[in-house]
Structure formats: C-alpha cells, structure tokens
Amino acid sequence: MNILLTSVGRRSYLVQYFKEALGEIGKVHVSNSTELTPAFEIADAAIVTPLIYSDDYIPFLISYCREHDISAIISLFDIDLPVLSENIELFKNNGIDVIVSDKSVINICNDKYKTYSFLKENGFMVPKTFLSIDAVIQAINNNEVSFPLVIKPRWGMGSIGVLIAENEEELLVFYRKSLSHIKNSYLKFESTENLDESVIIQEKLNGQEYGLDVINDLKQNYQNTVVKIKHAMRSGETDCAEIVDDCRFKELGALISKKLGHIGNLDVDVFLVNDKLYVLEMNARFGGGYPFSHLAGVDLPKAIINWLKDEVVSDHLLKENHGVIAHKDINIVQINSNNYPFKNSKEKIIIKQMKSQKEILKILQEFDGVFTPSISEKVGDLSDYAMKLSENAFVYVTYKSGNLGFVSLYANDINSKVAYISFIGVKKQARNMEIGRNLLETCFDKSIEFGMEEIILEVRKNNYIADKFYKKNGFSYLKEASNQSVYLTKKL
C-alpha cells in the first residue's frame, strides 16, 4: 500500500509518521508545486506537480498514482482540499482513495465566514464577525462590538494578511492592506468570485487559546477529541502546547463532529473566555497542532492505514496521554540540489538536434525509462532504432545542464504530407517548464519547412496529462491506434 501526501511543504514529521505506520507494506510518496521542499528529503519518493489550480493538476495526480500504484491521497494544505474533494469519484474510478471530507464540509472550513455562520446556526459560541467596513462601523456605533478588531482573509491559513486594528483609522488602513495581501498571494484563487467580500472583520477574543484534534474515522464516525492548551504560537501555528483532560472541550469536539460530519482529522481553534468556549476556526486536515497529539500517544496515520485495509482500529491508537508538554524546535534541512542541477544553472535552455547514430543512441538509452511502456519495449533493439532515426528522422533534445526532454519526428512523407512524432518525452524533474510545448513547436516548424500539412502522434488512453497537453496545443482525436492508445492529429 503506497500513500501520496500532497502539498507536503515542511510537514516532514507527517511523512515520518506515515512511513512508520506503513512499515514494510508500502512507501510514502510526497508532492509539492516546487522542488525546494524540505519534506522531499525524507520521503520514499517525491514529485513536483503543476499548481493546484492548473487544469493539469488532477490529471497529473491520477497519472502519477496509477504509475506508482498509489492507494490513497492525503492533502496537507487547505487550498488543495476543495480541488481534491470535487474529484473524489474520478480518483475512485481509477482505484485511488482520497482521504478528504465532502466538498460541503471543506467549504464550511475553508471559508471563515461560512465557518462563523455554520457554528452560529448550530448553537456554538463564536466571535462576532462582519463582511464589510460599513457593517462593523454600524455595530461599533450600536455598542455591539468594540476595538480591538481582527482583520483577516476570508480564505487562508496561518497568519497571512491577519492584522489587529485598535481604532477606526487602523481598521480602514488594515482592511485595504489585508485585501492587498489576498491579491498578491495564493489566496487570490479562492477569492476571485467575490473579492469585495474576501476580508472578514472579527471581534478579538481575550482568553486562553486551545487546540482540538477532533478525530473521525473514514465513515464520519466520531472517535476522540484531543485537547491542547496553547502556550506559544508562531506565524499562526501552535509552537508549544500541553495535552490536557477537560470534558468540556471533549464534549464540544464530539458535538462538532456530529454536526459537521468530517473525515479524519479536524483541527479546531477554541478560546476559553469567562468560562465559555468560543470556536474560532476549523481546518479539515492534519493541522500544525497534530504533532503534539502524536507525541502524546495518538497515531492517526496508523489508524488511517488500518481503516483503508478494513482492519479494526484498537482504542489505544487514538488515545492520548495527558500532561505531555512539547515545544517545536527549528531544524535546518539541506535540499539536495543535485537532483535539480538545471534549476540552479545560469545556462539558457536550448534545443539541439542529434544527428549521428551514436548520439541518438545515448539519448534513447537516457530517456528509455521516461516512457510507459519504455522505448525499448516498443521498438526492440535501441541501436537499430537509433540508426533508423539518424537516417530518416529529426531528433531534438532540450538541454540545460543536462538533457531534459527529447522528440523524434518524421517529416519525409512527401505524398501524404503527414508528419509523425514517434516519441516526445520530458523528465519528471523538468516538467512545468514548457519544455514539451517548445519541442512541439520545433516539430511544427520543421514539418512546415518540409511541406507537411498535418502532424500526428500516438497517446495512451490512460495518459490523461499527455492527452490534455496535446489537445491544449491544437491536437484532436483522429482514430484508434490500439486497445490502449489513440492517434491525435493537428493541421499545420
């Protein structure tokens, strides 16, 4: 059983937890949108993905999961959750479980105003919350709320764009500043449909802050609530905490679980103000406070693995020890830049033509494993195929501190005037650099130069990323090539 943790970032500890939970029965794969990711260094395998909001993101994940026999995906980033949740059935149809709550649950948790509305409608104590400057000023004038007030993005995590206003002048300035944070960060993707209501203004709670890990199984059944008193915070995340036993918080967690119906972990921020519990935020994922629960004896990764295997989860896996105090430390992780030498190189990306059998053979050998099935599986002897290409085809390589992609093109059928791309491939670590598009354009130009009027290629039916890529570049369906593949065509 292999697991993929998406948007893994700096959550190296969760990678380690899942590696320990899997033991010898599987591997932990991780992904992120940049190779400069600390958690890549300790995972069994790592891959750089397209950006979450890219049209290629979901097809890329599905293709990667099928290629590496991934059983389940778990995301560690709020922005990732709605995209994955919306495609649960598509993943399921490809034999992949996504450990994510229903889209309605994700929307409630990711949208802080919807969080406020949901909690208020269900009888929970919440800080007064407003969507506009006019509404909050009216509330101030009516003595319904007073300064200080918290201004923060309606969608987001951590402390991005969170400001505290002590007076009306600061309120106006900080509102605009928070809006600017949204426009200039990843939060703009969440806020595009309603930018005018993308900032919320909230009553500042004065009391002791607690964190809850409200744990449900994969069928939304409540399991436990782990209660943590927060002794220190850093950048919006719990830095020091103590595991405590308080039935008030446990009852609160159980009630939230019943009303919300989430899956897996729910990270909840709660304030104790004058002996009343105010719920501030909820995150439907592993939160920054989970390591404290894990250190106290809870092993949710192991429980998830057991649930996926339809095995019984013993009580001790989700039972915490009280009185455990922990503080996060700062650990420097060296990124292995040798895996991505071209990223650090000042060289320009160039496209070179390979002409001799010898140099073409080296390219075929180097890229053999990039393809599924491999080049050698399709053509047989690589040396003979290299000779054929050197005599009848054009072979181009994209180069920057190493070979990143290659293409082989036949543009010699003067009767049909149809060119044919026999292979085009880009190494995984070099994807999302428009290398494939540049290779295609080279083929288009060369085909037109030699009088070709059409260009075709073959793509496997289950290669969703490639199919979408080619169609984005002007190709369309031509006919079946085999049970596993189709021909695509483009007029030149």
Image (spheres, rainbow, N blue to C red):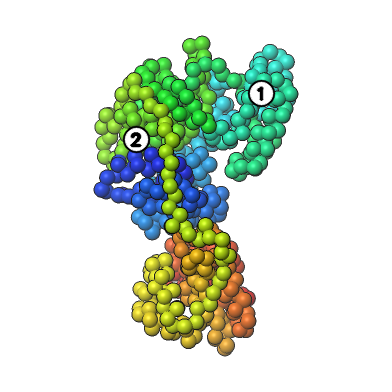
Q: Work out how far the residue at label 2 is from the one at label 1, CA to CA, in angstroms.
A: 39 Å
Q: Which mark is residue 408?
A: none
* Front-lying residue, 54 or 166: 166
Residue visible at 64% across and 42% down in the picture: 184
Judge depth for marks 2 and 1 and give the one in front: 1
Label 1: few (<14), some or many (≥20) within 10 Å?
some
Of residue 372 and residue 233, the one placed in the foreground of this image is 233
- Total labels: the figure holds 2
User: What kind of residue is marked 1?
Assistant: Ala
Inspect this view and state whether residue 256 appears: no
Q: Residue furthest bottom?
A: 415
Instruction: Name the residue tied to disc 2.
Output: 300
Q: Give the quadrant of residue 261.
A: top left
Residue behind mark 1: 165
Tag 2, which secondary structure? helix
Q: Secondary structure at mark 1?
A: strand
Q: Nearer the viewer, residue 108 or 318?
A: 318
Give whichever of discs 2 and 1 has the lower sequence position: 1
**Residue drawn at x 35%, y 78% as measured from the top left:** 380
Q: Residue at x 48, y 33 (%)?
A: 283
Can residue 48 be seen here? The reply is yes
Residue at image coords 66%, 41%: 183
Q: Residues within 10 Å of mark 2 (few under 14, many from 20)?
A: many
Q: Quadrant of residue 361?
A: bottom left
Q: Is residue 443 above or below residue 245?
A: below
